[in-house]
Image (cartoon, rainbow, N blue to C red):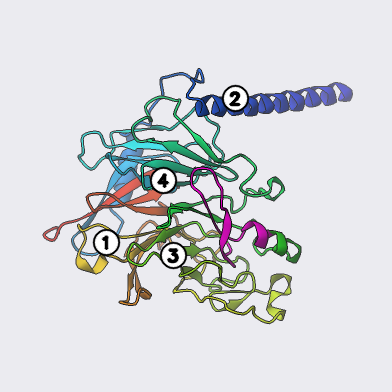
Amino acid sequence: MRSTYVRRAVTLVAAAAMATLAGTTAAQQNIEKLKQFKVSGTDLNIPPVPQSGKNADAIRKNLERVKLPPGFRIELFAVVPDARHMAVAPSTNMLFVGTRKTTVWAVTDRNSDGVADEVKPFAPSLNFKVPNGVCWTKDGFLIVAEHNRVLNFPAAEFFYEGPDVAVIEVVPQGKLIPPEEESFNHGARVCRIGPDGMLYVSLGQPFNVPPREKLKLYDEVGIGGIVRMNAFDGSKREVYARGIRNSVGHDFNPKDGTLWFTDNQTDGMGDDIPNGEINRITKAGQFFGYPWIQGKTRITENGYDKDPLPASIVAAQVLTEAHAADLGMTFYTGRQFPQKYQGGIFSAQHGSWNRTKPNGAQVLFTSLKSDGTADKTEVFASGWLDGETGTFRGRPVDVAVMKDGSLLISDDYAGAIYRVTYAADAK
């Protein structure tokens, strides 16, 4: 009897492995077809995500708890499962939204009323793997940065209706980082196109604190840093910044071209250390201290606190509350909000997971000084964390500016995108 169970188990495992292999093979065949502008045979009908009903009503009810400065209003923009980082389309009333799963969402406001009418998967004939990072080139190509691949989609906002879309393989599967370094931990990428036209991608290191034997490899590949490359063929790749634990949010200041990024905190050192960070890169090759120091805290794991600090560490511009999980950020380029906010930084705090007293789950605003450095940081939007029960009712991930100057906030816990607007006479 026991041998029968063993044979059945082996058969099931083998079948699962063959199914996985078949799926992988089919996905690779699909991308090769799309690169040649051929059809994949995927069903042309793509079911949209319902935008009404009990779930949408409950999300709207939770938004009544959110606190904003006077004159601001927050509303549900779209129901988007697992919504993570956002890329607002350059020419239409739509955006693309990444996830930590297998879907990139195309979100469309067809009648321009400030509420999404349609949410459906983008390019479902492809097999995405943690397509968290989405961004645009200057001429309207959509970049999707996955865990270990980078794809480029020409004119995605005009050719997203069907399952098959033109695609350029910028970095093939398994070439962004060594496959043996793939991990479920810290594998969500973010991307931006710089003033130089190059593609910048953050590569979080997979450990809480990296072991010493990994440092040389990580330094060479750019894991625990930010790399840049040609946005169309992946050429001219170089490590742009190092000494970063896990950045899941960066943006360029349009005024001076500096690249700012958030960085997540080391766990297991207590509730109040180390601080989260918002950093500023002013030139290629800068080093931001990790794993020897984070914020003002020396890292003790693996004995890094026993080493002398490396030279030329660039200090953080902003130190945030420990373990609030600072993620997406954007420079506010709109004109709808008051002058105070124009040119400043909005950033999202996802919220703590292992703190004795939960914190985060809010959106911050950082103003800048005339020399381009950080001035003051304050809470802009809060209320997703119930202070009495410690329950999260939402977890902000990313922020993005719409062309009308409104601000979008994504929430992967509630599976939603919110829209913040301002009117001086609003009560």
x then y, percent, for residue 275 = 51, 72
Q: Residue at x 48, y 36 (%)?
A: 103
Q: Secondary structure at mark 4?
A: loop
Q: Examine the image and state in which quarter residue 307 appears.
A: bottom right
**Which residue bears the numbered disc 4?**
414
Horizontal side of residue 94 vs 38, given as left or right: left
Q: Which residue is mark 1?
A: 68
Circle 1 SS class:
loop
Instruction: Identify which residue is drawn at 64% across, 62% down.
Output: 208
Rounded to the nearest angstrom, the CA distance separating label 4 from label 3 is 27 Å
Q: x, y percentage for residue 14?
A: 76, 25
Q: Crowding at label 2, few (<14), some or many (≥20) Cα neighbours within 10 Å?
A: few
Q: Which percent across, then down, holds residue 149?
A: 57, 42
Lower position in the chain sequence, tag 4 or tag 3: 3
- Magenta residues? 218-245
Q: Earlier in the sequence, mark 1 or mark 2?
A: 2
Instruction: Name which residue type carries label 1.
Output: Leu
Q: Are marks 4 and 3 in contact (CB under 8 Å)?
A: no
The quadrant of the rendering that contains the C terminus is bottom left
Which of the two discs, 1 and 3, labels the residue nearer the N terminus? 1
Q: CA distance from mark 1 to mark 2?
A: 49 Å
Q: Which residue is mark 3?
A: 260
